[in-house]
Image (cartoon, helix red, strand yellow):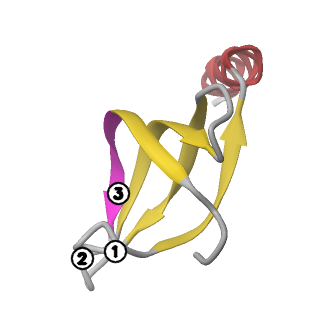
Amino acid sequence: MAGIDYNIVKNIGTVSQSPKGWEKQLNVISWNGRAPKYDLRDWAPDGQKMGKGITLSLEELQSLKRLLNHMEELQ
């Protein structure tokens, strides 16, 4: 991505992998020198290309976790 600088601070894990090898990963990433945030997106097998994703603060990630935990209770 031209003009966007990023640094993967920590790879937390892989959520899924497509037949073509792309992985949906949860990482902690610093975008354009800003404070690191949690990031969920697809990455090419070589790690050089990325798909669209979402970036969350710690508070947003914790809120999502609470929602997902509640969703399990409803099933």
Q: Tell me the number on the disc at residue 65.
A: none
Q: Nearer the viewer, residue 75 or 16?
A: 16
Q: Which residue is mark 1?
A: 44
Q: Which residue is mark 2?
A: 21
Q: Amino acid at mark 2?
A: Gly
Q: Is residue 63 above or below residue 55?
A: above
Kindly check if marks 3 and 1 are in contact, taking CB atoms under 8 A apart as contact. Answer: no
Q: Which image quarter holds the C terminus?
A: top right
Q: Nearer the viewer, residue 16 or 31?
A: 31
Q: In the rendered image, which quarter is residue 11 located in? A: top left
Question: Is residue 9 shown left or right of residue 74?
Answer: left
Residue shown at 76% from the left, 23% from the top: 60
Segment tinted magenta in the rendering? 11-17
Mark 2 or 3, nearer chain start = 3
Q: CA distance from mark 2 to mark 3?
A: 10 Å
Q: In the rendered image, which quarter is residue 47 located in? A: bottom left
Residue 15 among those drawn in magenta: yes
Residue shown at 68% from the left, 15% from the top: 62
Mark 2 or 1, nearer chain start = 2
Q: Tell me the number on the disc at residue 16.
A: 3
Task: Tell me the SS state at disc 1.
Answer: loop
> Can you tell which of label 2 and label 3 is closer to the viewer?
2
Q: CA distance from mark 2 to mark 1?
A: 7 Å
Kindly check if marks 2 and 1 are in contact, taking CB atoms under 8 A apart as contact. Answer: yes
